[in-house]
Image (cartoon, rainbow, N blue to C red):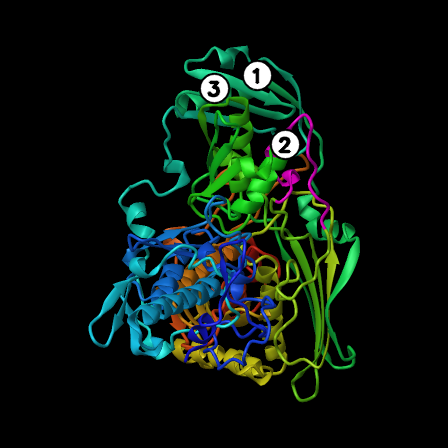
Amino acid sequence: MGILQHEITRRTVIAGTGGLVVSFSLGRAFAQAPAPTPPAATSPAPPASLPGSLDDDRFLDSWIRVDPDNSVTVFTGKAELGQGIRTALLQVAAEELEVDPGEIEFVTADTGRTPNEGFTAGSQSMQNSGTAIRNAAAQVRALLLAEAAKRFGVAAAELRAENKSVLAKDGRRASYGELVSGQMLHVEAQPQSALKQPGSFRVMGKPLPRVDIPAKVTGQPAYVHDLRLDGMLHARVVRPPSPAATLTELDQGAAEGMPGVVSVVRDGNFLAVVAEKEFQAVSAMRALAAAARWQEKETLPDQTDLPSTLQGLEREVGTVAEAGTLSSNDKAFEATYTRPYQIHGSIGPSCAVAHMKADGTLDVWSHTQGVFPDREAIAEMLAMPEDKVHVIHMEGSGCYGHNGADDAAGDAALIASKIPGKPVRVQWMREQEHSWEPYGPAMLMKVSATLDDRGKIASWAYDLWSNTHSTRPGGAGALLAARHKAEAFQPEPAKLNISPSGNGDRNANPLYAIPNKRVLWHFLPDMPLRVSALRALGGYANVFAIESTIDELALMAEADPVEFRLSHMEDPRARAVIELAAERFGWNKAQMARNRGRGFAFARYKNLAAYLAVAMEAEVEPETGRVRVVRVVSAIDSGEIVNPDGIRNQTQGGILQSISWTLYEAVAFDRTRITSTDWSSYPILRFASVPDSVEVNIIERPGEPFLGTGEAAQGPAAAAVANAIRNAVGKRLYDLPFTRDRIRNAAGRA
């Protein structure tokens, strides 16, 4: 008898609720481990914890619904951001439910329908939502089997689930819709589930085509930008010219008199125009901007001396890791690395639609990565009860963290509250996206490492200076619209928070075996430029600094970089990706052609998610400073594979994004204004510079927990670029990005 069948015979109807609650006295089990035989339940105490996000929303029907018409609906609080998570989660549900993926209605982040899973961030969707859905689906399947067993008068073990039905050996069958009734699925989930074994998978582990792609490539409505509602108006916001600017004078008459203009909205420094058609709104926005007078202040730091500025902003120091005693008597390597402010670079500017309805409720469609936190922020800004605000996720084009999506939602909500009864669509302009989105924070990293007489790392001192990397909504002060209102909301004070997954300190503690080390985060609570989560958070710059240093230490030890890494690596799964990437790349000690170099790097994302190693070959033009990564070979271990194509897509995308950050991207500013306002002043990787090949080799780990993949490549890819350039020109670059001037200087051609 399986665990669920065993318990169903003892499930108890809780009087007065109408719900069926199955309770166990088991501790939390490994979420994806096959279910062991449980001890007998002795009391109906609630379970201590449940797998993944089930722990936050514990009832099965919060995740899966089966209706009498035999339709199946699966819910997730995670959002599709272009990372393909909708497809992977659908595969998980289809596998455990024994339903064809095309037969499932899949509902993503919606405050009115789905579980609250916070933000879609940190490569945690599979670990949290995937694990929750898998366990919930397995338990729903078991409940349906148990119900059929009762009706057929046979043991559940003699039945099988297939194509939304339960079948008996004698040919009898009942559809899921026929079996489900009343509150059957309104039961609290169990800590353990009878999960399908890897060898029996029909859907998981196979490349199911992405379900979000067809609409995108055929021009159908796919993004929030495409949303059109009856009677919808169009709005544009007039942003201040600089972060500290104050609106002192406004003649709005000309804009109000323009064709199609419905309203000019002003609330303190928040200024917007609403028109019947989009181009009318754009034209009126420009007229309104020309009529506005602002008082500006010099509040931005000196960009030419950013490292000193960062060190001067230090207010607190936290210890990330500490072991042994640092030594200074051995061969030492010291270096200082820097990372600039960088943008998310969304190709489509942020957009949202909001509708204040006659009943006083507000609907907001947004490409936010957290519908529930965004709802909380909007409700606070408008002094509305949260249950009167409904936030529905629709895709945007490229989020990669906390970009302008939440702010656009705040803009739309504020404007819609001034024009009740009409849906209002707000889209940012390109210069607004570049100037006002929260940036990835600038960072400074100092490393001092020594080698002993055996060529092994003896000690490691690592100091990083950084702001927090997350100022996401939750409070209204995170929204630009709320900050610019006459009764302005202030952002919540930033706090130093050192956790296992890390923030600015993400991946700052190297995974290598180093007996003596100290890793410190010099925390900067003040933020001269507005910052928040950019993909990988501090992991990008920390891995870049660590893996660049590891290469220099290998040179000092006269060791091959790959062999040097392996000699300091004890984790067998880490060793496996390092060895596989090196093997598939054809890593050797042969001299490369002139001005060509090879680079290698490794990291385990957050030191607790996917393992990734990458090898690159790069070509450097000393005369022009141009660098082109020629080919890339990577190896990744993401735990149990759900969609191998999805893992490859995410890894390839992460590598290309990291190459772009590393070679091109830095926010420029003077003492008053952001000057990176378009793609010319903020260059990114273009198609002509994309590598000839980006190979991703996936290590299969059947039965292992899902490991986050999406942000695993950013740090190692940056370091591999740095190490390849070092190999090609014989000189290391320490300051990101590796611009053409910096390359020419390194190559001695300045």
Residue that badge 3 annotates: 284
- Give how far across and how far down residue 127 sits, in percent: 50, 65
Q: Earlier in the sequence, mark 1 or mark 2?
A: 1
Residues under labels 1 and 3: Cα distance? 11 Å
Q: Is residue 347 left or right of residue 372?
A: left
- Give how far across and how far down residue 172 sits, in percent: 22, 70
Which residue is at 28% across, 50% downward?
A: 214
Residue 668 bears which disc, if any?
none
Residues under labels 1 and 2: Cα distance? 31 Å
Which residue is at 51% across, 32% downward?
A: 362
Residue that badge 2 annotates: 383
Which amino acid, mark 2?
A: Ala
Q: Is residue 664 left or right of residue 539?
A: left
Mark toward the viewer: 2 or 3: 2
Furthest residue toward bottom? 454
- Give how far across and how far down residue 256 sits, in percent: 50, 13
